[in-house]
Amino acid sequence: MAFVELEGVTRSIDLPDGGRLDILRGVDLRLEIGDHVSIVGRSGSGKSTLLNLLGLIDTPTSGRLEFDGTPLDELDAGERDRRRGRDVGFIFQQFNLLPGRTALENVVTPLLYATGTQFWKRDKIAREMLERVGLGARASSTPDQLSGGEQQRVAIARALVRGPRLILADEPTGALDVETGATVMELLDSAAEQAGAALITITHDPNVAALASRHYRLDGGVLHEIASDHVRSLAATGATL
Ligand SMILES: Nc1ncnc2c1ncn2[C@@H]1O[C@H](COP(=O)(O)OP(=O)(O)OP(=O)(O)O)[C@@H](O)[C@H]1O
């Protein structure tokens, strides 16, 4: 069974001048646990809007979205928030760590909203997650004391600490140099696989996209699948997607 399924999903905005902007048009997408999918597209093609729908931040204008077997319209706002916190991990281009808080405090934050063992053992769980991203020795460092690659590894630990089943990464290597980006992406890919989560990566970099097993392009709000061979050949030539 798909973990998230979109069928004929649209997202439109009513503009102040009375017009309408169709941001997503007829999007079909099925994500299974363990999938790694890449999405590319020009600025304004609807990538962030699609991630917001997948992450239960926003709702479609029309079409069907099922999250873990439940149609979205059966989830009220409180239940959407609860499922987002439990099942979805977000990773952003600019890391979005809490400034002035240590790496450990950043990774603990999602566990403050958890219940049971995850809440009571939050420090231990967060420390183990920092170890897993190779930053056990930097638990007391604040973001300004960490390199970009280290900050993104903290962000990965934070995204994974509640054991999400869906990880949404928006240009996760966009603020890193090529080599650091490759290391961070390999870590994210293997951590998602170990956790048994579905990973969706938005990227302009064919080397990053090549780690995914399925590839899509958003073009004016329409989602098209693109061939893996095409992505791999672009990665080999160093072109951009
Ligand atoms: N709330 C809104 N009101 C008006 N227009 C919006 C709103 N949200 C998104 N848009 C417009 O919808 C289009 C798609 O936006 P979206 O942020 O999804 O694009 P994107 O592909 O993520 O772009 P980028 O790569 O630049 O981040 C853009 O033209 C944007 O200006």
Image (tube, rainbow, N blue to C red):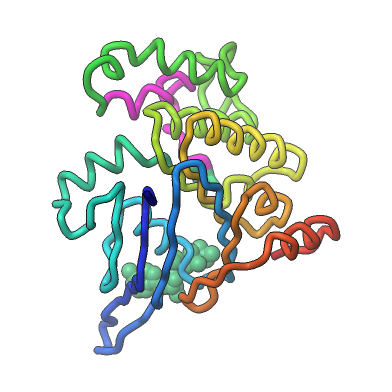
Residue 195 position within the rendered picture, expressed as x and y whole percent measured from the top left: 48, 30
The quadrant in which residue 15 appears is bottom left
**Quadrant location, the C terminus:** bottom right
Instruction: Name the residue at 49% across, 20% down.
Output: 129
Residue 79 position within the rendered picture, expressed as x and y whole percent measured from the top left: 17, 44
Vertical position of residue 223 compared to residue 121: above or below: below
Residue at the far right in the pictured view: 237
Along the line of sight, the residue nearer the viewer: 144 or 225: 225
Ligand 1 found in image quarter: bottom left
Residue 22 position within the rendered picture, expressed as x and y whole percent measured from the top left: 37, 80
Vertical position of residue 143 compared to residue 75: above or below: above
The quadrant in which residue 89 appears is top left
Residue 49 position within the rendered picture, expressed as x and y whole percent measured from the top left: 40, 64
Instruction: Name the residue at 39% across, 76% down.
Output: 26
Along the line of sight, the residue nearer the viewer: 66 or 123: 66
Q: Is residue 184 left or right of residue 201?
A: right
Q: Is residue 153 left or right of residue 31?
A: right
| Magenta-tinted stretch | 95-112
Instruction: Name the residue at 28% across, 66% down.
Output: 64
Vertical position of residue 240 compared to residue 224: above or below: above
